[in-house]
Amino acid sequence: MAADLPAEFDVVILGTGLPESIVAAACSRIGQRVLHLDSRNYYGGNWASFTFSGLQSWIDEYKQREATTDEPVTNKEQILENEGIIPLNQRDRTIRNIETFSFSKSEDSNIVEEIGALSIKPELLNTNPTDGDQPLQESPAPEQPELQEPQSESVEHQETTSESDQIPGANIAPNSEGGSTTDAEPNAAKVCQTESRKSITYSDIVREGRRFNIDLVSKFLYSRGLLIDLLIKSNVSRYTEFKNVTRILTYHNGRIEQVPCSRADVFSSKQLSMIEKRTLMKFLTFCADYEQHPEEYQDYKDSAFLDFLQSKRLTPSLQHFVLCSIAMVSKNTNTVDGLKATQHFLRCLGRYGNTPFLFHMYGLGEIPQCFCRMSAVFGGIYCLHHSLQCLVIDEDSKQCKAVIDSSGKRISCNYVLVEDSYLSEVTCAQVQYRQISRAILITDCSVLKSESDQEISVLTVPSEDGRQNAVYMTELCSSTNTCMKNTYLVHLSCPSVKATAREDLEPVIQKLFTLDADGGE
Amino acid sequence: MAIRELKVCLLGDTGVGKSSIVCRFVQDHFDHNISPTIGASFMTKTVPCGNELHKFLIWDTAGQERFHSLAPMYYRGSAAAVIVYDITKQDSFHTLKKWVKELKEHGPENIVVAIAGNKCDLSDIREVSMKDAREYADSIGAIVVETSAKNAINVEELFRGISRRIPPLEPHQNGSNGAMKLGRQTSQTTNRCC
Ligand SMILES: Nc1nc2c(ncn2[C@@H]2O[C@H](COP(=O)(O)OP(=O)(O)OP(=O)(O)O)[C@@H](O)[C@H]2O)c(=O)[nH]1
Ligand SMILES: [Mg+2]
């Protein structure tokens, strides 16, 4: 198969995450010959989304790869005299500490099978064809996810792999200032049964596993910003659909409350007094074009946004709403940044719906695929499950002139773009890594019930002592095509502070979710 | 009449005539020297069906299938898939089965599957019998026809067959799931909260 690949391209791109896919589309669009590869057999790298069984195989795969060592493969035959090489990682190491838990009671103990499931290809468990030391046939491919016994102990997986989570543009909330940092993420996944209403069991989830599209990294988008502009301008938006986030929630005084943010919300709010409503409306109106009224915040330019809010006589509840859920900034953010964030929120509000945020149907994992499709439409060549051994550098010009692919074939090119997780630790010694703790839960009822069971909610949980960062949560309903009927897919994240994602997020999860009383833990 | 958009994705080996079938259906045109597909992402054609108008949004693979790297987004939300083989190439009929498997794995449930045995104008050098094709199609509940994009045989029938298999909307349904496409037209530049 690789033999069919042409031996010359203008641009070779390794990794199919969002940034790489956007570059691939852009290069193809201007007529460059693009080869786009990924060592995995799925699109997206750490931007991928998986079905329920797909996620389990992904976890198993990480576990397996952890057990093997990375042997650098270099094919010296293809290297000329005045050429050097930069070897690439054959294994990805940024996601760490994966643990899974099931709190579901499974009264039906017969083995279940995912509807329409096909046996998982063994290569799914070994995305690295060049790794000779990894016995393919010994991968115990789970033909179907095993049913866990009632109250089974949690299955623990611990792996070290790598992820490049580079966030382009400023319109991915909430970690929008991520710029070009790379996150290494301890990741925890949890299957959690809250109040059993329709009594969703673990076997139900397995059976309906294909209804899930579980993002490894979940993000929602501001409805205005560079990425939205790009989707529209490039026409990639026609490949894909969004839904507006329907509710913004906050955790306040030990309760979950809905944040009123539009004019209609504010006036219909039951939690706000008449005076609060007026104060909030007046404040938001000011924020919408705060630059026009510098006199209003001149004296607070160098102080914290919170102090400014207090000076505007916002009550503690209003301060909380504005700070945590509208501006989504921390207590020590300065006034101008807080105003800017509030203004951005307001500008995004009402563009497509009642909140400023969009969520992608089928999950974020679709967006990179849409850009890849655009690249393919303009001639980009796609090859998954195919990697690079090394980059070939011309010693004189210090430029990369070719690559050696995983089958040992030399492919010449003018430009190479490599997702950061493929670069060795030595190559990336200068990069500052940022850790993010994440948890993914499947629950059977919303954290805040409402008339509709199809709400898409965003929730901010500020840290108790105000010193740590807030935990952000999204709760997706089944109409986003990310989870089965009568369940919710919940993603939580916060910058890592403790050693594992579990330690960082468990306290918040315990606050927000209850386990079925007789389900036990 | 209500217009219903129906996504249809094309599958099948390279060179079996996927693009030619679409070109015949949409433009009633055949090009002997059509090049392997790049640059086409989708074509549309609207046809009446009962009390509805069916607007087919026909997606071409854009070549991503060549190295077995078709993205799952390609199948998302498809109402139907047209899987094409070349009746003069046994191999292309063999890979058809792989595409069916792939669809079952990644495609939506209830997707209408239509099998087109293309190039039926070349039946003197045929390698796949209609009987084999029909047996296989019946076994997976698919529509099957032999087509010729070249001589305009059965191409419209193929799509008519798909239309017939699409259940009509119930009166209360509007065919939308509440999701939206982002586009220039939807952006309201001055809409603010206050
Ligand atoms: N005789 C005959 N030739 C056909 C017919 N349909 C297509 N062809 C020829 O078959 C060749 C391939 O057709 P395409 O439509 O490009 O095939 P494709 O499946 O789109 O191929 P890729 O885009 O490479 O995947 C072209 O030379 C067409 O002229 C047909 O019905 N009869
Ligand atoms: Mg074609």
Image (cartoon, rainbow, N blue to C red):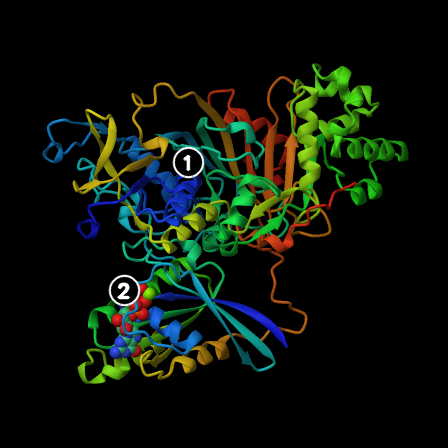
Q: Chain of mark 2?
A: B
Secondary structure beneath disc 2? loop
**Left or right of residue A259, residue A498 in this image:** left
**Left or right of residue B122, residue A268 in this image:** right
In the rendered image, which quarter contains the C terminus of chain A? Answer: top right
Name the amino acid, label 2.
Thr
Secondary structure beneath disc 1? loop
| Residue at mark 1: C-beta within 8 A of ligand 1 | no
- Image position, residue A94 (x, y; %): 39, 29
| Residue at mark 2: C-beta within 8 A of ligand 1 | yes
Name the amino acid, label 1.
Val
Which residue is under mark 2? B14
At label 1, counting other C-alpha atoms closer than 10 Å, the crowd grade (few under 14, some 14-19, many 20 or more) is few
- Image position, residue A147 (x, y; %): 42, 48
Instruction: Find ligand 2 in the image and state its quadrant.
Output: bottom left
Vertical relation: A67 (above or below) A107: above
Kindly tell me whether residue A146 is visible in this rendering. Answer: no
Which quadrant holds residue A389?
A: top left
The residue positioned 49% from the left and 48% from the top of the image is A202
Which residue is under mark 1? A155
